[in-house]
Amino acid sequence: MTLKEIFQLAAEKKASDVHLVTGQRPIFRIDGVLYQMKEFPVIEAKKLFELLESILDERQKNIFFGSRELDLSYEISREQRFRVNLFWEKGNPALAARVIWLKTPTLEEIGMPPITQYLLQQNQGLILVTGPTGCGKSTTLAAMINFINTNRNCHIITLEDPIEMVFPSKKSIIVQRELGRDMLSFAEALKHIVRQDPNVIMVGEMRDMETISATITLAETGHLVLTTLHTINAGQTIDRIIDVFPPHQQTQIRFQLSLALRAIFSQQLLPRLGGGRIAAREVLINVPAVGNLIRENKIAQIKSVMQTGALHGMFTLEQDLQRLLKEKLISPEVFEAYSYLK
């Protein structure tokens, strides 16, 4: 049993995640459900050490044993790449890996609404993709970058932890930078990125106040910025951004955000009727009414603007769930199960 064999089987079974834990067989997440793989034996601690060390160089080993955590990417073929997190549990190493398909999806293939193409043609502003872990945020960002790369003559710089999908330059030039290898932190990279002549910047995740502040500033100053947050809807996303800052800065951040924000796409992955999964989304477009509500700190009223904003390309998660149910893409049980998020 090798790590490559485990990852190859995960790819064959179209798993989204792989988990290796001492005392258990390899575990795959397929269509959101965890399965122990009977094709492999139970992994003992010594064997797991061997499996993990087989993919680490000396620098990575020092980081893993020193900080007890490590993120890296691992490729087994031109079609399959994995985002790997190594950690420790009960004194033993463990692995969690996300399967990354190297065929970059199109916006149409992942069901993005038509307004997305218009937004990605803009020269500046902030576009946020939000949702819980495993909801397809990275895939959505990849489809957005793919659209720009195919249709615009731009210099695109991505800041990632780690690099997931590798983009060949098409109409655009793409530079991909990885945390720990090509940069020391998102915040530091963002301080210097203006001197690298970017048109479009993709930040893997806004993790702290310094990164959020730099990202908003870049979106104000002539750059289109794409990024993610772990929030479940548009209102919570705006609140999360503002609440990161101390009270005396929040009025200024609300003003900046009201000008820089272009759109928020919040998504969930649901079980699809007939197998597989499908995304349900809500979309907020920063029309003048939304900008005013952000400046006036009336975030709770934004939902009513979304409910009546179809002409601008807006809709709520509840409206999208109803669409999916009507089109028989999800079951009534799934509709009820996810309606609490509305």
Image (cartoon, rainbow, N blue to C red):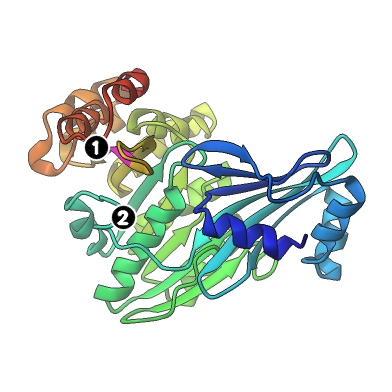
CA–CA distance between discs 1 and 2?
A: 33 Å
Q: Under tag 1, what secondary structure?
A: loop
Q: Can residue 130 be found in the magenta stretch?
A: no
Image coordinates for residue 333, horizontal then vertical, percent:
32, 21
Image coordinates for residue 10, horizontal then vertical, percent:
58, 55
Quadrant assignment, res 6: bottom right
Can residue 334 be seen here? yes
* Magenta region, main secondary structure: strand
Mark 2 burial class by Cα count in 10 Å: few <14, some 14-19, many 20+ = many
Mark 1 burial class by Cα count in 10 Å: few <14, some 14-19, many 20+ = some
Q: The disc labelled 2 sits on which kind of residue? A: Gly
Q: Residue furthest left?
A: 311
> Is residue 168 depicted above or below 223 in this figure?
below
| Residue at image coords 65%, 65% | 74
Tell me the quadrant of the picture where the C terminus can be found: top left
Q: Can residue 282 be found in the magenta stretch?
A: yes
* Segment colored magenta: 279-283
Query: What is the number of the mark on residue 120?
Result: none
Q: The disc labelled 1 sits on which kind of residue? A: Leu
In terms of sequence position, does the residue under pointer 1 or pointer 2 come before the other? 2
> Is residue 330 depicted above or below 46 in this figure?
above
Residue under label 2: 125
Residue under label 1: 329
Which is more foreground, mark 1 or mark 2?
A: 1
Left or right position of 190 against 46: left
Q: Under tag 2, what secondary structure?
A: strand
Left or right position of 51 against 224: right
